[in-house]
Every structure is written in structure tokens, then in C-alpha cells.
Image (cartoon, grey):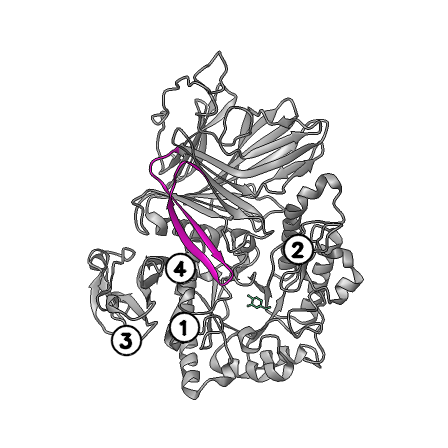
Amino acid sequence: MNSFDIQFHNGQFHLFSSKVSYICELHKDAWLLHRYWGPRLTAYHGANCPEPVKRTFAAADPEEPAFSLEMEPQEFSCPHQGDYRESSLALRRQDGWPAGRFRYQGYEITEGLYAPEDLPHIRPLDGKGAKTLSIRLRDEASGAALTLRYSVLEDSAAIVRSAEITNEGTGPIWVERAFSALLDMPYDGEELVTFHGTHQKEFQMDRRLIGHGTISVGSTRGASGPQYPPFAALCAPEATEHSGEVRALQLIYSGNHCVRVERDQYDHLRLTTGIHPEGFSWKLEPGERFQTPEAVLVYSGQGFNGMSQVFHQLYTERLFPRQWAGRTRPILLNSWEMCYFDVSEEKLLPVIREAAALGFELVVLDDGWFGHRNNSKSSLGDWTVNREKFPNGLTPLLDCARENGIQLGIWFEPEMISPDSDLMRAHPDWAARFPDDAPLLGRNQLVLDLTRREVQEYVLDTLSGFLRTYPVSYVKWDMNRHMTDPGSASLPPDRTGEFFHRYMLGLYRILHELTARFPEILFENCSSGGGRFDPGMSFYMPQTWCSDNTDALDRQSIQYGASYLFPPSAIAAHVSAVPNHQTGRMIPFETRAALASSANMGYELNILDLSQEEREQVREHLALYKEERDLILGGAFYRLRSPFDGNLCAWMLVDRKREKAILYAFAASYDVSCLSAVLKIPYLDQKKLYVERNTGRRFSGEELRYAGLAVRFPQGDFPAIKIVLQTETMS
Ligand code: DGJ
């Protein structure tokens, strides 16, 4: 038997890899029913199918009274057909009537992945297999066709799903809801894990019981948002970081989204995800198609760390831009918390020289360098260098960086327009707005109407021109407000519900073009930190500034939370000054450095202000990070102790051969719990002997797993420790 495949037998579709099986079945050659999603099965005979029983109140055909969509586990659902649970698809015809009595028509199995052109997606990969099942259904009355796509990937416990609606009729059809995936299963005591957050407090974990009714999380902000990133996991009540069943999904999308979990009156559990239906509608003319974003479904039998391994591996191999796979990421110094808007050639030249001397590899010129921008009130859209601050343009900075052997990076906020800008004066209709209402400001700015081709072209031309004039190595792509007034002068009345998704398509087009034109530039994603940290943006930009909160205590939970979905290479973390600019906390330098150095490290403080002793410390941090960087950004990341559960937080990185591990542990404050902290480490090779670098103590992988490692925190608040373990043969 193949290690991964899709088979169709006796009306059953079985997708499997070595790690997962996904099964759905045709009923009477018309309806598509869900059967199974879990560990790989070699055979399935329908053991989990309850015997159909006729129920009072259920809508059923008298020919088959025990078959009602209300009771059946499905793969998608349209309203008004007896299934009263959350639907995943809603269509309306030109005459105003709902449509969507979809019946099975046929299927196709193809090699590889579907990879929708205008949306971010899981990438096909040379040398690694994938297969895709496309199941086609049709609603005869309206002429709407529905294609459900499922991909299975070699060596992965992930399944990729999406849906496509085609208008094969003669009149227009409006798509009013188009979710990417729907999953039905019997409720078995599962709990729901989602993340919540806000600006400066992203990725806070929520784990809750699932009562009857619907739980819905998502975003209507025009961005995925820090409030509820597009993720949800159903887990067994006993599931931990290390064990137990977890079924998770993420949407590869950066706009309005939702995840809904419903437990119905029969204790069926339904999980759906897709574009948020609020305000959404999409007109399909005859012959047109609508493709949903992809949803990634992950099964883990090894708890949440098992789930994260699948996401991390999948995204590293098949989501992040290929040119950055395995490539060294520069250690950067960012100007924001050093200068805020007060940047200038005079200030930056000595910073570049000193940064190079300390071992930095890139200096980033953040906000404040363009137009007449001295605060957040002006100039977004006017991407020309401010000659008062940089009288000679940016060439002196680039020259200085090159002479000192480092790189230069730059900040943009390309999706925005300031009311006080030349761009606004020239194109007042380029700001998104409703025709009769004054658009609302956020951080003193408006959102550019990226649904319009000419606005997309402006952004592309302006940025491309800039990047050709000033060949920087890095671009930080920021978005500092979410949307209101989702209106475009170019959308006709029957297409106003298309604004949000058209905006995303416009943005993705810009990102696709720009990253293709400048493949050598490292793009970093940012939306006031993690305001749009999702797999959609990560398709174009391999790293994200995950929070504007640089406080090394708050950051523990933010980075811990983000690690459920993303590997350390995707999480940018900076060492900043004390007292911390967001919280006022005084956290020791070593703790700040340990925290940042366990992800994609940078700094964001005035290095010219450092004492000689601090300079030496920075030099050492950077030198050590360079030594360990391959392991940190390329190894496997495991969470060991949750900051959401108490005073301690711990995680580790292990190289792929399990020969070297770096363990980080942090305490929120020093208290008695620090005296007896023991961390169980189930992720080393049990047969190997490990030596602790600083002490020379030896431990077996087996004992670290079952007995655990006692860790000793230094006294004082906010202590951190870092332990390096290496197999004996390597030392
Ligand atoms: C928000 C970002 O997260 C910050 O790092 C900085 O780039 C500012 N925007 C600049 O306005």
C-alpha cells in the first residue's frame, strides 16, 4: 500500500497518509456524508455509523424516512434542507430565492495540490508527494456547481480543504456564505481551544468546555486580527501538550474569517471555518467561479506539541516563501523604540557603524523617513524620502551599511493613506469609504481601496521604484489600523458585499508581484505587531513582528501562544530597553536576551546609549545566537511549561538528530515555586546520554523524559535560565 493515497471504493473516499485518514461516503449516489477523521486506518467498514432511526420533526423523504440531513454527518451544508445546524454555504438566485440543493455528480483524483493562483496556499513541493480529490456536486435548479477539494500530503498529518462554486446557469447567482471546510463528528467530551488577544497582548490561550449551542470566533475587521486568529482545536479532555487527541484547523487567509463550533441537540459536533459571512456576498455571473481560501486540518494523537509539529513542518516546507527555506535570517536592529519618528541621516549613520561593530547584520529604518512625517498624522502614501531628515536621500545609509558589512532595511505601510498627504490631495477617492459618510480615522489614517486595480498599480509602482533606487535587503510591511467604511467607488450596488474579499485579493496580488520582483528582499509582516499574523500573510513573508509589546514578561505568553501555530523562524522577537516602553517593567538584560534569542532575534534599543559592559553583553548575545541560530530557526520547537498556567514558562529547541537541545525557562517572578521546578522533557532520544554544557552533568534521555530535570533559577524577579544539552559523542 502507498504511504499516502486517495482511494474510492464502494462509494467511500479514503484519503490517507502514514499519519492520518479522512473518509467520506456517498449516500444513494447523491449525498456526501462524513465518516472519519483521525489516525490512519488500514480499513474502514462503517463501525461508527449509528443505525438510522426515523425521528419526529426531522425532514425526510417518505421513501427513506430514517434519512434526514439533520442527523447525518456532512462535508458541507446548505440551509433549508432539514439540517438546521450552522451551514457552510448559502446561495441566492437572481429572482431572490435561495439555491443549493447540491447532489453528487462525480469525482477526480489528481497528483499534487490545487494551489489557487490568487490566494495564498499550501505549495506543491518537488520531491514530496501530494494528491487531491475533487468532488463535484450540482444544484440543478440554479445551475450552481460545487467542487469540494481535499489534499493529502506525504509524511504529514495535515489535510487541506477548500471549496469552489461555479455558476453554470444562465443568470447571476449571489454567494452569501462560502466556508472552506465543515466537519461533523459525534461529541465525545471534546474541549475547544482558541486564542484571543488585542494590540500588545496577542495569542492568549482559551480552553473551554463545549456546551450546547454555537461558539463563534473570528474577525470582521478586514484583517485576521489579534482578537481571534483563524484557528481552533478540538481536544480530548485529557489532552496535554504531550499526549491526547487534538483536531485543529487554520485558515490560510488574512481577512474577515470565522470559526464556529456547534454542539447540537443530538450531541453532534460541527466545526466550520471560512470567510466571515457578515457583510459578505459575491455576485457570480454565468461562467464565473468563486474559490474559498484553503483550510488546513491537522490531526494529532500526541497532544498540542504533536499538533504544532505538523503545522511547523508544513508551513516551513510548504507555506513560507521557498527562497527563505533554510536560509539564514539576519539579526536586525530596528530604529522604532530607539528613535520613534525622529530618524535622520545624522542619527542613523553612527548607529549603523556601531551595529556592525557589535555584530548586527541588518539595521532597519522604521517609520518617520518619508513625506513630512514627524508623527502619525501625515504622509502615508507619499513614499519619498524626507529631505530635511535625509538631505542626501538614503544612499549614504546604504553606503555606510555596505562599507561596514551589514544590510539596510526599511519600513512601509503601503495599504494606508493619510488625509494629510499628497496622495490624498491627488486621489481623494482612493480611500475606502461609503459614499455619504465621512470615513472614520484610525491612528489618524484611512485605508487605501485596494479593490481597485489602479490603486494596486500605484502601490506596486511606488514601492518597486523605491526599491530599485534604494536596494535595501529587508522590508517591514506594516498595517496600523483595521477597517471601517468598507466601500469602493468602483463597486456597483450589487457588488458592495465584495469589498473585503476583493481587498484581500488586491493585497495578495500586490504581495505576489512585489515578492516576485524582489525575491532577495526579506519581507517582514506586521500589523501593529501581531494584528494580522496568519498563514495567509506568512505565504509571502516568512517572519512576523508578533507584538508591539516588547516586555520580556508579557512576551512569554505571546510567543508561547504564537508557537502553537508558527515555528520560531516566523516569530520576530526583539530585545528592548528598560524601563520597558509599554509596561515600565525592569527586566534583566539576560532574560530579555534569552527570550528574544529563542525565536527570530533582533534588537530595538539605542545601542549608542549602552554602557561598555552592556556592549560586551550584546556582542556575546549576538555571537552566541549566530552559533545557535541554525538549531533555533531550523530545529523542532516544543513547549514544556505554560505561562497561562502559573509562574513558570519553559520551552525547548532540539536539532533534527536529537543531539543538541537548548532549553529556556522563565519565571514571572521569583517565588518558592522556583526552588523546586522540575521539567519533564519527553522530546530527547531516550537511548542517548546528554551532557549539560555549563555544568558537565550527565543525564539520559530516558531519565529526562520520565524523572525530569530540576532547574535552578537565580534569585530576583523575572529570572531566566538557559540550559544546553548535548549528546556525549558530540562533545
Ligand atoms: C507599529 C509597529 O508594530 C511598530 O514596530 C512600528 O513599526 C510602528 N508601527 C511604526 O509606526
Labelled pair 4, 2 in contact (Cβ < 8 Å): no
Three-letter code, disc 2? Ile
The answer to whether the residues at label 3 and label 2 have Cβ atoms under 8 Å apart is no
439 relative position to 659: left or right? right
Front: mark 1 or 3 = 3
For residue 625, side relative to residue 361 (left or right): left
What span is in magenta? 186-214
Verify CB contact (< 8 Å) between mark 4 and mark 3. no
Of mark 2 and mark 1, the one earlier in the sequence is: 2
Question: Mark 3 or mark 2, which has the lower sequence index?
Answer: 2
Alpha carbon separation for disc pair 4 and 3 = 23 Å
Residue 715 bears which disc, if any?
3
Residue behind label 4 places its C-beta within 8 angstroms of ligand 1:
no
Q: Please tell me whether mark 4 sits on a helix, a strand or a loop.
A: helix
Comparing 137 with 428, the one in front is: 428
Q: Amino acid at mark 3?
A: Gln
Residue ID at (67%, 77%)? 394
First in sequence: mark 1 or mark 4? 4
Quickly name the residue at label 2. Answer: 510
> Of tags 4 and 3, which is closer to the observer?
3
- Report the front residue among 686 and 220: 220
Residue 521 seen in render: no
Q: Based on the picture, tell me whether residue 71 belongs to the magenta stretch.
A: no
- Cβ atoms under marks 2 and 1 closer than 8 Å: no
- Please identify the residue farthest to the front as the structure is shown: 437
